[in-house]
Amino acid sequence: MPFFDGGISTQLPGFEGFEAIVTLGDTVFLVIEGKINTGRTAFLISGKIRAGLSEIRLDPTSLVELEPKTGFHNIS
């Protein structure tokens, strides 16, 4: 399925990748992981699934930064 991120992956400073996706009808919500200065951050963005599952297109105007809930570093 084609995926159009609206330029977020190249325009968002500290972009590290899409981490999770949730669907609700034809709406998608994705979490983006990023790094700002020495800290970690996350963003939430929404978009639409086109008819027939022909593509996912994100809406860059929906981007919001999520406030970190802990001071823990991201460790895998």
Image (cartoon, rainbow, N blue to C red):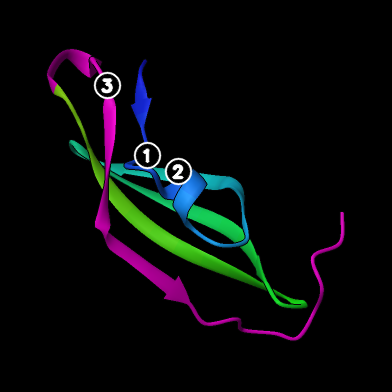
Locate residue 39: give its quadrant. Answer: bottom right
Locate residue 53: give its quadrant. Answer: top left
Question: Label 3, label 2: how many angstroms apart (C-alpha)?
Answer: 14 Å
Please tell me which residue is depicted at 60% across the width and 58% down the height of the picture. Answer: 33
* Amino acid type shown at disc 1: Asp
Please tell me which residue is depicted at 49% across the width and 55% down the height of the picture. Answer: 31
Locate residue 76: give its quadrant. Answer: bottom right
* Amino acid type shown at disc 2: Ile
Mark 3, residue position: 55
Q: Which residues are magenta?
A: 51-76
Q: Which mark is residue 5?
A: 1
Please tell me which residue is depicted at 46% across the width and 53% down the height of the picture. Answer: 11
- Judged by depth in the image, the label closer to the viewer, 3 or 2, is 3
Quick check: 27 above or below 1? Answer: below
* Amino acid type shown at disc 3: Glu
Question: Label 2, label 1: how many angstroms apart (C-alpha)?
Answer: 13 Å
Quick check: 69 above or below 53? Answer: below
Mark 2, residue position: 21
Q: Which mark is residue 37?
A: none
Bin the neighbour count of mark 3 within 10 Å (Cα to Cα): few under 14, some 14-19, many 20 and up.
some
Q: Position of residue 64 (x, y in %)?
A: 37, 70
Q: Position of residue 17 (x, y in %)?
A: 60, 46
Q: Secondary structure at mark 2?
A: strand
